[in-house]
């Protein structure tokens, strides 16, 4: 599968690059960011996947989060995909910011007209890692995942649905219980249809209740002044309660004064990189 390099910038002795490729899963052209640490020039590196939130592209995280220095120090390749298919010309895909373009919700849609292209779950789980492992100096056995908001939801469900695939998982302000919040009901209803029982397969709080895989040490940071926390969109308490009941370790840090923005992410990104480096033996 051909990769086209869109940009390359030297950063902390490594390179922050963006590539474009034709996705078989999403049936459109997709971009992803990839940070290659200096260690990648001489050996294979573990890979950390970042999933972004609503309205984002691959650009938000690579330009705003300031993760590259820590990734360089720990020798981690960091891959940053887009948040939805692009340019599919589906009626209604650009009508709202929380559904369609920029809002793929990391599910495989089953409803028309979305089911042909909106397969972000399979893209992140299968197609993208195969592409990365075939083209870059990765260690395919060492892979972790994290994300923000909708992407935090994506990271949690991918880790919970695929025990052993990811060495670690973390999230910033994740949508923890989408079947119970407005964002989730709109997205899951639109992509998966009106039967709410089908939504549970993409809900971290529901998934954790039946998780029986290898031990996952989950780290979550949440800003206390996050407007979406107070609006009931994120519902971390429901997830923590389910984890506690199942004796699944979760470190949940409520950060005083922080909101939902990339200023919040940038403030704690180094802690998350260190968390993953510990499990990736980097």
Image (spheres, rainbow, N blue to C red):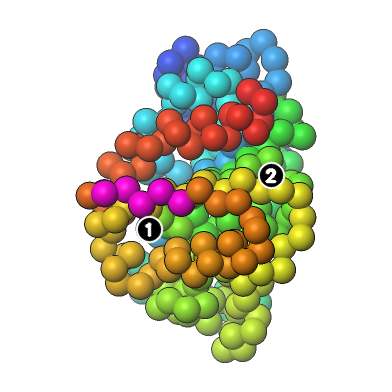
Mark 1 Cα-neighbour bin, 10 Å: few <14, some 14–19, many ≥20: some
Q: Secondary structure at mark 1?
A: loop
- Compared across the picture, whether 273 is left or right of 255 comes to right
Residue 140 position in % (x across, y down): 75, 34
Give the answer, above or below, for where 224 lies relative to 195.
above
Question: Dot 2: what SS?
Answer: loop
The secondary structure that most of the magenta stretch takes on is strand
Q: Between label 1 and label 2, give the one nearer the viewer.
A: 2
Identify the residue at image location x=60%, y=14%: 39
Residue at (65% x, 58% y) in the render: 247
In the image, residue 254 lies in the stretch drawn in magenta: yes
Residue displayed at 58% across by 35% down: 276
Mark 1, residue position: 55
Query: Which stretch did the figure color magenta?
Result: 252-256
**Residue 82 locus on image (x, y percent):** 50, 50
Q: Earlier in the sequence, mark 1 or mark 2?
A: 1
- Based on the displayed image, in which of its 4 quarters is residue 55 positioned? bottom left
Residue 59 picture location, percent across and down: 40, 41
Residue with the mark numbered 2: 166
- State yes or no: residue 34 in magenta: no
**In the picture provided, is 101 more to the left or to the right than 41?**
left
The reply to whether residue 25 is visible in this rendering is: no
> Residue 173 versus residue 254: which sits nearer the camera?
254
Quadrant of the frame with the C terminus: top right
Rounded to the nearest whole Å, what is the CA distance between mark 1 and mark 2? 25 Å
Residue nearer the viewer, 75 or 221:
221
């Amino acid at each position: 599968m051909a990769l086209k390099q869109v940009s390359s910038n030297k950063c902390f002795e490594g390179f922050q690059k963006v590539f474009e490729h034709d996705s078989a899963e999403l049936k459109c052209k997709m971009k992803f960011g990839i940070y290659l640490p200096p260690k990648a020039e001489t050996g294979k590196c573990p890979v950390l996947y970042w999933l972004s939130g609503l309205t984002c592209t691959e650009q938000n995280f690579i330009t705003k989060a300031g993760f590259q220095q820590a990734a360089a120090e720990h020798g981690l390749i960091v891959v940053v995909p887009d948040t939805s298919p692009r340019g599919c010309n589906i009626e209604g895909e650009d009508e709202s910011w929380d559904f369609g373009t920029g809002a793929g919700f990391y599910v495989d849609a089953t409803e028309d007209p979305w089911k042909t292209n909106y397969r972000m779950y399979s893209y992140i789980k299968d197609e993208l890692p195969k592409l990365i492992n075939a083209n870059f100096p990765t260690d395919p056995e060492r892979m972790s995942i994290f994300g923000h908001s909708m992407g935090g939801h994506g990271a949690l469900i991918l880790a919970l649905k695929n025990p052993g695939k990811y060495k670690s998982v973390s999230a910033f302000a994740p949508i923890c219980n989408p079947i119970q919040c407005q964002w989730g009901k709109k997205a899951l209803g639109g992509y998966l249809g009106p039967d709410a029982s089908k939504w549970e397969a993409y809900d971290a709080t529901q998934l954790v209740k039946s998780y029986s895989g290898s031990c996952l040490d989950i780290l979550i940071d949440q800003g206390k002044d996050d407007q979406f926390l107070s609006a009931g969109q994120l519902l971390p308490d429901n997830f923590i309660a389910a984890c506690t009941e199942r004796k699944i370790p979760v470190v949940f840090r409520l950060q005083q004064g922080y909101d939902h923005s990339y200023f919040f992410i940038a403030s704690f990104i180094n802690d998350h990189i260190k968390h993953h480096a510990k499990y990736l033996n980097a």
